[in-house]
Image (tube, grey):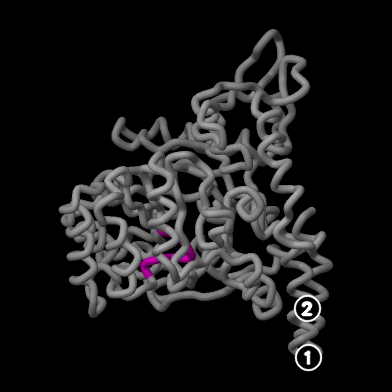
């Protein structure tokens, strides 16, 4: 069955994960096993039966690939408007290797960094790894990035993402980082690197042949007056158990870089308050900053991992109450939805009605940031589009503005495939 599921969902795992993180006596319930090894329940029963039958019959590769593609395109490969709404333009041309959703932050996808040391089964960027080239973000050119940044001086943060930029050799990473230090880009104050490497391959920062050169690159970024933040994805405290993981964090911090930690709340892996409290406590002890607890995005095998918002809030609060103030820097539960990042701040009663209290942390329209709004309480809802406005409202405050933003994008689709446009 693993082979059948892996034809649809990407599968890659590092020796560090296999040897140091998975407790094989607890398989398949072990959280790191669930985090990295595709499970039968991740596919709809009919899709699973179809793929298993094709594999067992040793069907032609083209037939297996076609069946997998059909399933993949039904799994919302690019959630929250990533493909239709986030890709910026320069001189009338789309910059396919970039995203610009929030005013201050640009995401850049270096082409050599569009893989990972191991794949998370929940990953919302799984489409980057399954040969769906028409849906992949990637760029080899830093010239377009720097030109765009010079034209958009409101941008203060650049996030190198993927995949995982830390799969690149340091000499390759330099080609993407050093141009951001050039004169004329002083308004770019922060360089972020999204990475799972401290968990899945901490040797990248410690004993890899170019680990010392990587540390020197980090030091150069800091010496140039930039804030360097490694956005480290730690999903479970087990990932911090190996001594080499602690050494990796120590070496990163010694360069002047800051390690900020984030992950989604995912069923089968970390859906209890004690797990998050232990993880935040460990991160603080190591000098890392707990940053976000995300709600699992509406893509890929979401049905397997999703946790209702009400339960997510209970887990977040249960963890929050166990840690000191330094561990309470983690925001959550946070949905990275089409209009922006939406926090579930609480559940209360307004005029006798049970409601979710929601807050827009970041919005496509910067004026939306900080807005508090209400949705009818629904114990089963697991995503923003499953909520309805409370207090007799017919729509949420951002919906009219969002319609105005999305109309041009719908008039000029980037593909004619109705399965993608749906």
- As helix, strand or loop, the secondary structure at mark 1 comes to loop
Residue 163 magenta-drawn? Answer: yes
Residue bearing mark 2 = 66
Give the quadrant of residue 197.
bottom left
User: In the current view of this chain or complex, which residue is farthest to the front?
Assistant: 91
Residue 334 magenta-drawn? Answer: no
Q: Are marks 2 and 1 in contact (CB under 8 Å)?
A: no
Quadrant where the N terminus sits is bottom right
What residue do we see at 57% from left, 71% from top?
129
What residue do we see at 67% from left, 35% from top?
402
In the rendering, at what x and y percent does residue 269 appear? Answer: 53, 55
In the rendering, at what x and y percent does residue 347 appear? Answer: 60, 23
Residue bearing mark 1 = 60
Tell me if mark 1 has few (under 14), some (14-19) or many (20+) residues whose alpha carbon lies within 10 angstroms of its own.
few
Return the residue nearer the eye: 335 or 307.
Answer: 335
What residue do we see at 40% from left, 50% from top?
149
In the image, residue 415 sits, relative to residue 305, either above or below, namely below
Report the span colored magenta: 160-166
What residue do we see at 61% from left, 22% from top?
373
Mark 1 or mark 2, which is nearer the start of the sequence? 1
User: In the current view of this chain or complex, which residue is farthest to the top?
Assistant: 351
Q: CA distance from mark 2 to mark 1?
A: 10 Å
Question: Could you tell whether 65 is left or right of 225 in the image?
Answer: right
């Amino acid at each position: 069955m693993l082979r059948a599921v892996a034809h649809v969902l990407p599968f890659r795992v590092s020796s560090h994960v296999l040897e140091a993180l998975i407790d094989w006596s607890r398989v398949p319930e072990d959280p790191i096993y669930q985090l990295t090894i595709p499970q039968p329940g991740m596919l709809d029963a009919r899709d699973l039966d179809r793929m298993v039958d094709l594999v067992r019959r040793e069907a032609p590769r083209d037939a297996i690939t076609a069946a997998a593609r059909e399933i993949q395109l039904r799994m919302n490969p690019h959630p929250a408007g990533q493909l239709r709404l986030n890709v910026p333009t320069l001189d009338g041309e789309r910059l396919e290797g970039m995203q610009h959703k929030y005013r201050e932050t640009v995401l850049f996808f270096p082409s050599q960094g569009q893989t990972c040391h191991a794949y998370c089964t929940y990953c919302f960027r799984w489409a980057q790894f399954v040969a769906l080239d028409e849906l992949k973000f990637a760029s080899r050119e830093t010239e377009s990035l720097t030109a765009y940044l010079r034209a958009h001086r409101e941008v203060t943060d650049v996030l190198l993402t993927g995949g995982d930029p830390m799969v690149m050799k340091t000499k390759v990473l330099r080609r993407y980082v050093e141009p951001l230090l050039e004169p004329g880009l002083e308004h770019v104050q922060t360089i972020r690197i999204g990475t799972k490497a401290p968990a899945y391959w901490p040797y990248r920062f410690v004993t890899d042949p170019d680990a010392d050169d990587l540390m020197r690159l980090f030091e150069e970024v800091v010496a140039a007056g930039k804030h360097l933040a490694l956005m480290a994805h730690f999903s479970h405290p087990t990932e911090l158990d190996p001594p080499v993981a602690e050494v990796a964090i120590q070496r990163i911090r010694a360069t002047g870089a800051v390690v900020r930690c984030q992950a989604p709340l995912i069923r089968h892996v970390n859906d209890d308050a004690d797990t998050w409290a232990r993880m935040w406590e460990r991160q603080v002890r190591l000098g890392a900053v707990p940053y976000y607890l995300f709600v699992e995005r509406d893509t890929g095998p979401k049905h397997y991992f999703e946790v209702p918002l009400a339960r997510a809030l209970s887990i977040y609060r249960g963890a929050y109450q166990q840690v000191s103030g330094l561990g309470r820097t983690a925001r959550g539960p946070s949905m990275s939805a089409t209009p922006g990042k939406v926090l579930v701040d609480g559940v209360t009663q307004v005029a006798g009605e049970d409601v979710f209290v929601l807050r827009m942390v970041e919005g496509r329209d910067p004026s939306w940031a900080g807005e508090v709004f209400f949705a009818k309480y629904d114990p089963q809802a697991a995503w923003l589009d499953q909520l309805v406005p409370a207090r007799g409202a017919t729509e949420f405050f951002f919906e009219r503005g969002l319609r105005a933003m999305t109309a041009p994008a719908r008039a000029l689709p980037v593909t004619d495939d109705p399965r993608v446009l749906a």
